């Protein structure tokens, strides 16, 4: 009987400790672009006034007419991000943004957005701690609290510009495997 109690106790403690673990997410987020027909429908609906009358903007001047990098920059600007130059030829980078200030360090991060193919965009998130002594350390994952501070704004802005969130990698993998 005593031999069964120790493993059972160890199992209960491990379950308790695992419930206290943070919810982790990868340092990127994927977005899909709908087909050109869907983009044309979005452009036509945006060219209508609330009363249902055409606004004078032709449908091809809307979301569907802009290139992917133009839509990415417009979405980033709408979400409050300033873009900057980067060494990567196809990536669009943002300036650093302070997420939260603690006593000895600040959590700072920036984004790199890269179109992958014709119908896929990936946002790489680069969070790190910047200490008051000048040193910085990379944060290896995104907690739920960090994600909630900026991802909803990005999702909304990218959706307005024809890029819908593709879900987390775990959700996509689960759908593919079924």
Image (cartoon, helix red, strand yellow):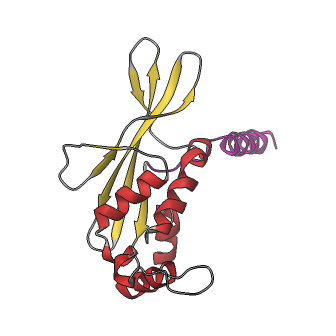
Choose between 61 and 56: the one closer to the eye: 56
Residue 41 seen anywhere in this rendered image of the structure: yes
> Residue at coordinates 44% horizontally, 38% vertically from top-left?
140
Residue that extends furthest to the right in the rendered view of this protein: 1
Is residue 98 magenta-colored?
A: no
99 to 156, vertically: above or below:
above
Quarter of the image where the N terminus is located: top right
Where in the figure is residue 80, as x and y percent of width and height? 48, 47
> Residue at coordinates 43% horizontally, 85% vertically from top-left?
38
Q: Main secondary structure of the magenta part?
A: helix
Is residue 7 magenta-colored?
A: yes
> Residue at coordinates 39% horizontally, 54% vertically from top-left?
123
In this rendering, position of residue 160 left or right of residue 15: left
Give the residues drawn in magenta, as a range: 1-26
Q: Quadrant of residue 13?
A: top right
Where in the figure is residue 60, as x and y percent of width and height? 34, 82
> Residue at coordinates 54% horizontally, 61% vertically from top-left?
156
Where in the figure is residue 139, as x and y percent of width and height? 45, 34
Numbered marks: total: 0
Choose between 85 and 4: the one closer to the eye: 85
Residue 35 seen anywhere in this rendered image of the structure: no
Residue that extends furthest to the top in the rendered view of this protein: 133
In this rendering, position of residue 153 left or right of residue 35: right
177 to 122, vertically: above or below:
below
Where in the figure is residue 159, as x and y percent of width and height? 49, 67
52 to 88, vertically: above or below:
below
Q: Quadrant of residue 134?
A: top left
83 to 61, vertically: above or below:
above
């Amino acid at each position: 009987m005593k031999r069964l109690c120790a493993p059972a106790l160890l199992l209960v403690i491990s379950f308790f400790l695992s419930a206290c673990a943070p919810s982790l997410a990868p340092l990127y987020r994927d977005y899909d672009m709908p087909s050109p027909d869907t983009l044309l429908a979005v452009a036509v609906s945006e060219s209508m006034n609330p009363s249902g009358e055409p606004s004078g903007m032709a449908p091809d001047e809307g979301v569907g007419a802009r290139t992917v990098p133009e839509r990415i920059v417009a979405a980033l600007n709408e979400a409050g991000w300033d873009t900057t130059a980067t060494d990567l030829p196809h990536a669009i980078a943002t300036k650093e943004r302070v997420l939260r200030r603690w006593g000895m360090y600040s959590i700072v991060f920036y984004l790199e957005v890269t179109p992958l193919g014709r119908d896929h965009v990936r946002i790489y998130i680069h969070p790190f701690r910047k200490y008051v002594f000048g040193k910085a350390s990379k944060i290896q994952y995104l907690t739920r609290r960090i994600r909630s501070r900026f991802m909803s704004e990005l999702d909304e802005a990218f959706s307005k510009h024809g890029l819908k969130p593709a879900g987390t990698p775990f959700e996509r993998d689960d759908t593919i495997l079924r």
